[in-house]
Image (cartoon, rainbow, N blue to C red):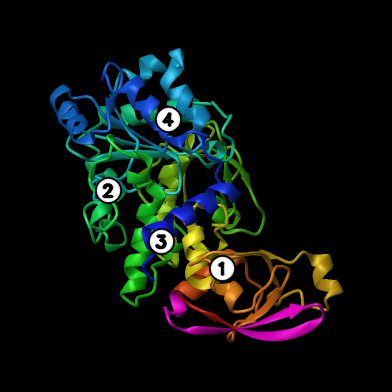
Amino acid sequence: MRIRLPARLLTLAFAATLQAETVKDREGAVREDRAKLEDGRRWNYNDPDSGFRLAAETGKPLLVILRCVPCLSCAGIDAGVLEEKELAPLLDQFVRVRVINANSLDLRRFQFDYDLSFSAMIFNGDGTVYGRFGSWWHQRDSADKSTAALARTLKAALLLHQGYPGNKGALAGKQGAPVPFRTPVEFPALSASYSLKLDWEGKVVQSCVHCHMVGEALRQHFRTRGEAVPPEWIYPQPSLQTLGVDLAADDTARVETVRAGTPAARSGLQAGDQLLSLNGQPLISAADAAWVLHRAPEQGALPAVVRRGSVATGLTLELPAGWRRNSDISRRAGTWQMRTMVLGGMVLEELEESARTGSGLDNGGMALRVKHVGEYPPHDTAKKAGFKPRDVIVQADDLRERISESGLIGHLLQNRRPGARLKVQVLRGGERLTLELPQQ
């Protein structure tokens, strides 16, 4: 399925309306951002290559902030980074680059959580990655201006920089993985509509490749080739919550809670533990932990080192088969594309327990209520197939067991190809109906 530009713009507008609030004057916000920062006194603007050169020349580490200006999410922390006087002395120890679009990003270097509207990557001047930063706390609360976690990440990065290159071996796992194209605009899904540079003389926002579009282009690449979408691109950058850990919002990787009965609990992790390394990689942020999981196997074990009190302790975090499907991807911008591919544009939610009982449904069976049905192409496939809001999906082909929307999306992207027709049983007003849902 190749989404043409008008359809893509509809996707972005629709997702923005339901999920990610944007500024009223998107064009004006981008131009104002450039006018304030392009003089280069505090930030190198939109030119990471010159940042790498300057870092190599000065011996400073390189901090690259990646920010989607039209999106209100993360506006608080973005303002804190730009305006907080207490943070300035720390930032001054870095070569600083602000990037506001993904068009020309070198994807061999810039691999991070593409669904965030504010991210950071920290490098040595030779391109070696020290770490990543990105916050879903700030993503969900545009008023959150806290920079405490970022400050701790930057301080930890400076320590890694002081130990470089002696610690280069420990940093090997943080480096980027192979990618099919060097820049986003080389992907067929983007090449016809975007170029390497923003159109500052025209409509600049419409010329911008947003970060989430990189993940979408990757998934489209596999889908167009008739291949299963790799699990790490269905459930990208999974948080440790997937394994039962909640990290503190104001620290690098400090365990706040461990849920009973989860892989994290079985590993011996405890509240208060400071995660120092995971799978051999030094952790300087929650995003670093997500990167480890992003590159982790589908089943296996990850060694971890924690500081508990004043003692460093080794643990083993077991990854059970199918662990990624515990990720909740429902609020990710890139999930809208996946819903179009395999759910025909529907948004699904699990039926609450009381409603299950009232409908006579088994507690262990599938019960996904249709929360929304897309109205416009290409998101209206489910509507054309006869699906309606409040339908309850109880079977998809031979899949009947209890599953979340995120789990069903992953199952279908792995096991169904474009052109297939999925037989779906739904409950509607006490009647059981069978519908066919085309896969795109």
Q: From the viewer's perspective, is residue 369 above or below residue 394?
A: above
Please give the name of the residue rendered at 65% of the width and 75% of the height, measured from the top-left corner: 387
Inspect this view and state whether residue 320 appears: no
Q: What residue is disc 1 on?
A: 407
Task: Check disc 3 and report its element: helix, strand or loop.
Answer: helix
Which of these two is toward me, 350 or 132?
A: 350
As measured in the structure, the alpha-carbon distance from the residue carrying label 1 to the one carrying label 3 is 13 Å
C-beta proximity under 8 Å, tags 4 and 1: no
As measured in the structure, the alpha-carbon distance from the residue carrying label 3 to the one carrying label 4 is 33 Å
What span is in magenta? Answer: 414-435
Q: Within 10 Å of the Cα at label 3, are there few (<14), some (14-19), or many (20+) other Cα atoms?
A: some
Q: Is residue 347 left or right of residue 311?
A: right
Please give the name of the residue rendered at 48% of the width and 77% of the height, measured from the top-left corner: 439
Residue type at mark 4: give it.
Gly
As measured in the structure, the alpha-carbon distance from the residue carrying label 2 to the one carrying label 3 is 17 Å
As measured in the structure, the alpha-carbon distance from the residue carrying label 4 to the one carrying label 1 is 39 Å
Residue type at mark 2: give it.
Gln
Q: Position of residue 229 (x, y in %)?
A: 39, 69
Q: What residue is disc 2 on?
A: 175
